[in-house]
Amino acid sequence: MRFAKGHGTGNDFVIVPDVDGVLELTPELVAALCDRHFGIGGDGVLRVVRTAAVEGAAASQVDAAEWFMDYRNGDGSVAEMCGNGVRVFAQYLIEEGLAAGPEVTVATRAGLRSVRAEADGQFTVDMGPVAVLGEGAVEAGRQLLAGLVISVGNPHVACVVDQPLAGIDLGSPRVLGPAALAAGINVEVARVTGEREIEMRVHERGSGLTLSCGTGAVAATVAASWSAGERPGEWRPSPWRVHVPGGTLAVRLGARASLLTGPAEIVARGQLENGWLARQRSAAGVGSG
Amino acid sequence: MRFAKGHGTGNDFVIVPDVDGVLELTPELVAALCDRHFGIGGDGVLRVVRTAAVEGAAASQVDAAEWFMDYRNGDGSVAEMCGNGVRVFAQYLIEEGLAAGPEVTVATRAGLRSVRAEADGQFTVDMGPVAVLGEGAVEAGRQLLAGLVISVGNPHVACVVDQPLAGIDLGSPRVLGPAALAAGINVEVARVTGEREIEMRVHERGSGLTLSCGTGAVAATVAASWSAGERPGEWRPSPWRVHVPGGTLAVRLGARASLLTGPAEIVARGQLENGWLARQRSAAGVGSG
């Protein structure tokens, strides 16, 4: 079984090519692959599968996108989209000769995503529409932070602050508001560091503090733009630079879609040992065929 | 550049074959390989090199051991020996056909180590002589724990306790005693869970809490044996079972040498991307030739 490892601003993935969709990728195998000591290690798995081979894929998806990004979280659960992952996915397709580039349309559980390989080696992703849902608040350690509730496909509370981010306890932030909202929400804190430039830290629900979050970078930019007095109808096309712990991203806010630009790097390629695979499958009670 | 990834009871390594000793393995490259998000990820690197190709290798080492284990910590620093790493190293040599087995003598910076592949797939390592140096004490959170200072090539304070190990704060234990001793010492807490059976947790100086530590398992066994009234001259050859967070090891104490038995698993093999390697070398200011 082949694999590759790659990352985008430190958000890292085990890439598993399975072009014909024949692999039995159980939650247990995903968790074993992502285990950083007993497996390869990663924040998640990107399975590379032909859209036509995905059960239940819409005909419109099959027509528009040859490849489907089957994204799984490190715990084995299914996820819809990942702004860092889809750049790594496109980089892998191009390096493997599975897509010609520079424009690659990728089918995801959140719909089609268009990714463009830029001349400087970065990748730009269409992150879809963004919506400001209202005001929110977060208890971070002993501080109460005011923020905006923002949907980037998934929900965020993004708080613009005027203090060093390192001093904010983001270990287990508590989102104030309706319980339904607080359950699956991501929290960002951001500080303006220059003209259309911010730094941010993110707590991803289910993963904790991470080095980077693509949708979080978009949400933090929306909040920073709001703080500067720009409302969604007034967004200008020039980019914001967003410094995350794992690197730097660029975000362009737009009425129909926002664009996320950042690096994507393939680190290595290889083969999983048959013995290791057989032991994972036997531990999970799955026949190895 | 080829690599493999393997682990022994969750202590994991990036294995780098360099049989002729031509690789420029800088501290920066080691740290980049061991980085769990931007590289492959591991607690350390095991470079596989012919002993004859190692600068300054003693003729006696060259004669006794075809292969030298060049062990590096995850931060790039040089280390002498690793009881979990040397099992993985031997497993790799045998799987690659570089050693016939079942007995493999490995040259290390701590001297020659003999490793035996057991019939059940485990590996037994000669850990060399062990010495009890005296009594010691550790401040762990708010608890003061009494222990023994033990040398297994490297120094340990091993504390046998009669309470659940999970309740002991091993985040930053403070070793009481001469500063020179406290500087580079590892701390184990162990509890007897059955007849010649213990569980242990370990804080490795420089790495913090780890899933396993081979020399620590030996030190904890010495302390448990001492608590049971056995003194070094009275050690019996039957094994102790040692449960560590990453699995189970067996330790046989002996007057001349103690033996450590445990699993070793190769997870995957592959190639690092040339682009990734070039970027690491350029970041570190090393010419890529």
Image (cartoon, coloured by chain):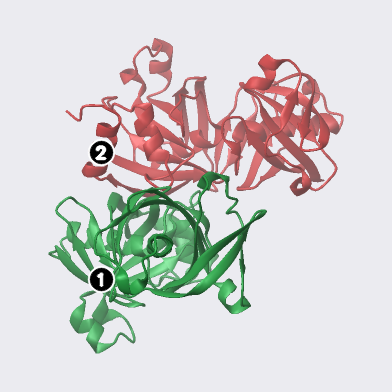
Chain colours: A green, B red
Q: Residue at x 37, y 11 (%)?
A: B56
Give percent across and percent down for residue B73.
48, 31
Q: Residue B276 is drawn in which quadrant?
A: top left
Q: Residue B76 is drawn in which quadrant?
A: top left
Relative to A108, residue B2 above or below: above
Q: Could you tell me which chain the residue with mark 2 belongs to?
A: B
Relative to B213, residue B80 above or below: above
Give percent across and percent down for residue A129.
33, 75
Compute the Cα span from label 2 to label 1: 30 Å
Q: Is residue B236 visible?
A: no
**Three-letter code, disc 1:** Val
Secondary structure beneath dot 2 equals helix
**Residue closest to the far front:** A229
* Left or right of residue B58, residue A125 in this image: left
Q: Residue B3 is drawn in which quadrant?
A: top left
Give percent across and percent down for residue A200.
44, 53
Q: Residues within 10 Å of mark 2 (few under 14, many from 20)?
A: few
Q: Could you tell me which chain the residue with mark 1 belongs to?
A: A
Residue closest to the eye, B95 or A239:
A239
Q: Residue at x 69, y 31 (%)?
A: B187
Q: Residue at x 80, y 35 (%)?
A: B160
Q: Residues within 10 Å of mark 1 (few under 14, many from 20)?
A: some
* Left or right of residue A230, residue B183 in this image: right
Relative to A254, residue B276 above or below: above
Q: Is residue B260 visible?
A: yes
The disc label shown at residue A19, or none: 1
